[in-house]
Amino acid sequence: MKIRVISAAILLAILIPIIIIGRIPFALVIGIIGMMAVKEINDLYKYPNVVKLLAFLSLIGIIYSNFDSSSMMFGLNYNCLSIILLGMLIPIIFYQAKNKYTTEDAFKLLGFILLIGLGLNCFILVREHSLNYFMFMILIPIITDTFAYIGGVMIGTHKVTKLSPKKSWEGYIIGSLMGTFIITMYYTTFINIQTNLLVVILAIFIMTIIGQIGDLFFSAIKRQHNIKDFSNLIPGHGGVMDRLDSLIFVSLIFVVLMKYL
């Protein structure tokens, strides 16, 4: 626990100033985080080196494909997407016969690249739009997960799924309710006091649920490969993907719901 707290404190000390500064320093850090995330996926599936390189380039292409925060929805550069699709599919003809990179591998890796890349691109777009909105977005899964853990420890008895046996329905309900309440207070204090409160509450509640689904999704991947963490990069916390799981899912739904906030 002590190592976990120290690691978290160091990460916060590094990331908070960069988040506040925003712009190019923030975008560069997001790119580095994305590269580390794809490395964890590449290590998990043992793809050929050429494919690993294409995965890195493809992810960077998606992360930096759109900096226009005024058009968050449907703002992906489709020229970039077309090149990425071709780049990740063409190696199949060279590696499938050797069973090193099959069609299933290609579409699996494409799915990860799109999920991680689009999620991190949303980070850049939302931060470009507003620091308060960015903090609002990332606090949703953080607060929700914290109270889900507390609620699960205190009264959790009904397990949600074998994918994550420590998670309980009681914890999830408490996490969503407390996350919705606290983040609503943040929104009305720092973003917009004159708002349609019912719409804001509903949007936040949906995002707390999506965040917990994201956590379960990545738990399913770890369960499938019989691993506890994606890596040991962050002492006490696991890998980059272990920290991004619910954040990525929340960021994707956030840019859809943002027009109502």
Image (spheres, rainbow, N blue to C red):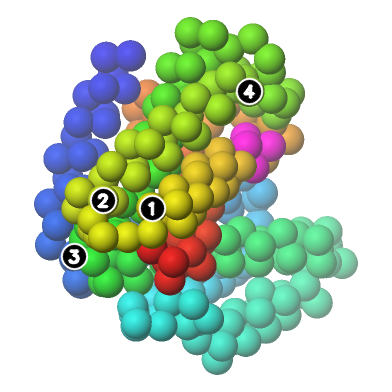
Mark 2–mark 4 distance (CA, rounded to whole Å): 28 Å
Q: Tag 1: Cα neighbours inside 10 Å, few (<14), some, or many (≥20)?
A: some
Q: Amino acid at mark 1?
A: Leu
Label 1 element class: helix
Specify the quadrant of the image occupied by residue 109. Answer: bottom right
Q: Earlier in the sequence, mark 1 or mark 2?
A: 2
Q: Earlier in the sequence, mark 3 or mark 2?
A: 3
4 vs 1, front mark = 1
2 vs 4, front mark = 2
Q: Amino acid at mark 3?
A: Gly
The span picked out in magenta is 216-220
4 vs 3, front mark = 4
**Which residue is nearer to you in this view: 136 or 82?**
136
Q: What residue sits 26% from the left and 22% below the top?
A: 5
Mark 1–mark 2 distance (CA, rounded to whole Å): 8 Å
Q: What residue sits 39% from the left and 44% below the top?
A: 140
Residue labelled with disc 3: 22
Q: Is residue 122 above or below residue 143?
A: below
Label 2 element class: helix
Q: Tag 2: Cα neighbours inside 10 Å, few (<14), some, or many (≥20)?
A: some
Which residue is most to the bottom?
79
Q: Earlier in the sequence, mark 3 or mark 1?
A: 3
Q: Quadrant of the C terminus?
A: bottom left
Q: Earlier in the sequence, mark 4 or mark 1?
A: 4
Q: Amino acid at mark 4?
A: Trp
Drawn side of residue 223 relative to residue 256, left or right: right
